[in-house]
Image (cartoon, helix red, strand yellow):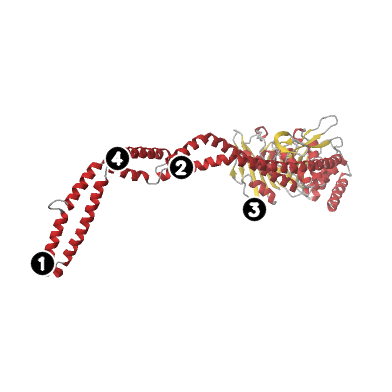
Amino acid sequence: MLAELTVRNLAVIEETRLVFGPGLNVITGETGAGKSLLVDALAFVLGGTADRGVMRRGADSMSVETVFALDEPRTREALAEFGVEVDDEDGVAVLYREVHQEGRTVSRLNGRAVPVSTLRAVGGALVDIHGQGSHLSLLDPRFQMRVLDDFGGLGEHRDSVECAVAEVRRVQGELGESEAAIREAEQRRDLLAFQVDEIEAAAPVDGEEEALLRERNVLEHAESVRDACVAAYEALSEGDRNAADLAAEALDHLRRAPGAADALGAQIEALESALVQLGDTAREVRRLAESVESDPARLAEIEERVELLRRLKRKYGGSESAVLAFGEDARTQLERIETADVRRGELERALDEASRSAGALAWGLSEARRSAAAALGKAVAEELREVGLERASFDIAVEQNEAGDGLPAPDGRRYALAGSGIDRVTFSARTNPGEESRPLAKVASGGETSRMMLALNSALQTVSGAPSLVFDEIDAGIGSRAGEVVGRKLWTVGRRAQVLCVTHLPQIAAWADTHFRVGKAVEDGRTYSGAESLSEEERVGEVAGMLGSGAAVGQVAREMLERAAQGKALG
């Protein structure tokens, strides 16, 4: 709730501080004392227009500070959406706004500089000002829908519809992504098919180019290799002085030496092994000499194959394995394209099923909302009569917009999809006979609108909107009998939410839980205005003053306060 309001240098107010309580807070005072200035100050700190024309003469700046005690979790959750963290120890939110004569403005939230738009958003979650239309959540069509749902006990039904709508949107999104992917893939189909065919036709083998280069090197030097092999063979085993004969001769000399087995055993063994190796090598060299031939056709084939492999590597990867991996990926993409139509069909069927389910739920919610709208409208009409607006009317429209891509309804039509169904809920009112009913946001502000909001809050029997409600000009044009009814209703609403009311009627003031009097005085040629909280005895004097002059007003004031106290005791 609003705990404190401090105003400095606003018109006739040099500085004043009000400490509010729970329930109904009433502000009274003589005409021109500055009662409505306090409401203007509150609207200013909550992001309203910064009018330097109302700055106190001679002052360099005007400022307003509010302290809100945040006891309810739902209020903290609402502020958390704006990034406002509340300290668990003190549990308060301090809003401060200052405007300077030269034009500079300062906005702070819990001591931190913030844009005025943040104060406006946070203020909208904390306070509804009825009368001017500022910070009035009930003027928001989205909130009107939630109010209607809460009144009709349709929360679970609405949640079911929201889940069903979310599923429709999810499938729509997936289908859209699928179709976009299909379009993109279709554009790449020919390219992918060409790439797969090219790689499959080439059928590269990992490490193939390296093996081909070795073979090409042999073919390019076939004559030289063959001549070398022939010469090596002759040196090893042909001719008069070949290596094999010389090694055999050396081995024979060693064997003939006396004691050769003991003294030359290792050397004899080594030469025997060498002779075997020389024979093997000679035969291998001879085989190579016989097998190596010039093959221009094979060489050309190798050159062509190497060039093909290198071209594939330039296009698809740096190695044969990379080329093969690219081809596999392209083949997978092609397969997805071929199966995409099947997936699209599945998604289209899923969307149709989800849409029909959501449409049926939304249609049922619409019917329930229309029933709740009729009941709420009737309840508000009764409340309007009690607050002196017998000639006013209150209407709740539950409407839909047809749309070709909307949710299918049992009536055979399709309706535009919304986050909580297919409905648009609009609260409308007519304050005088002969006028047309208009949305609340377009109804003229003033006492009638304030009483209409009070009637709506009374009919709802719940806290609608912000936890602090401000009613200004609510007593305009009503008499004492209606004033007492309005006072009781303000107090009743104050049991569920904090209420601040500026009033001229003693019948309303008598129901206050906390009563402030705004007065003004002239000192040294300057007018000063301020507010003070009244004791029970001081309230008697204030209510008596509001009743007028006469010997009996004091007694009437006491009786009025006692009657209100008895009404409070009875609830």
Residue linked to disc 3? 90
Q: Quadrant of residue 466?
A: top right
Closer to the N terminus: mark 4 or mark 1?
Answer: 1
**Disc 4 from disc 3: Cα separation:** 96 Å
**Disc 2 from disc 4: Cα separation:** 34 Å
**Disc 4 from disc 1: Cα separation:** 54 Å
Task: Bin the neighbour count of mark 1 within 10 Å (Cα to Cα): few under 14, some 14-19, many 20 and up.
Answer: few
Does the CB distance between marks 4 and 3 fall below 8 Å?
no
Between label 2 and label 1, give the one nearer the viewer: 1
Instruction: Residue 267 in the image: state x and y as whole percent.
Output: 16, 64
Instruction: Residue 171 in the image: state x and y as whole percent.
Output: 64, 42
Does the CB distance between marks 2 and 1 fall below 8 Å?
no
Label 3 residue SS: loop
Task: Bin the neighbour count of mark 3 within 10 Å (Cα to Cα): few under 14, some 14-19, many 20 and up.
Answer: few
Label 1 residue SS: loop
Does the CB distance between marks 4 and 1 fall below 8 Å?
no
Residue 516: in sight, yes or no? no
Seen from the viewer's position, the closer of residues 290 and 85 is 290
Identify whether 264 is placed above or below 418.
below
Residue linked to disc 1? 257
**Disc 2 from disc 3: Cα separation:** 64 Å
Q: Amino acid at mark 4?
A: Asp
Identify whether 253 is placed above or below 223.
below
Residue linked to disc 2? 326
Residue linked to disc 4? 295
For image coordinates 42% across by 38% down, the residue present is 315
| Residue that lies at the very extreme toward the top in this rendered image | 434
Q: Amino acid at mark 1?
A: Ala
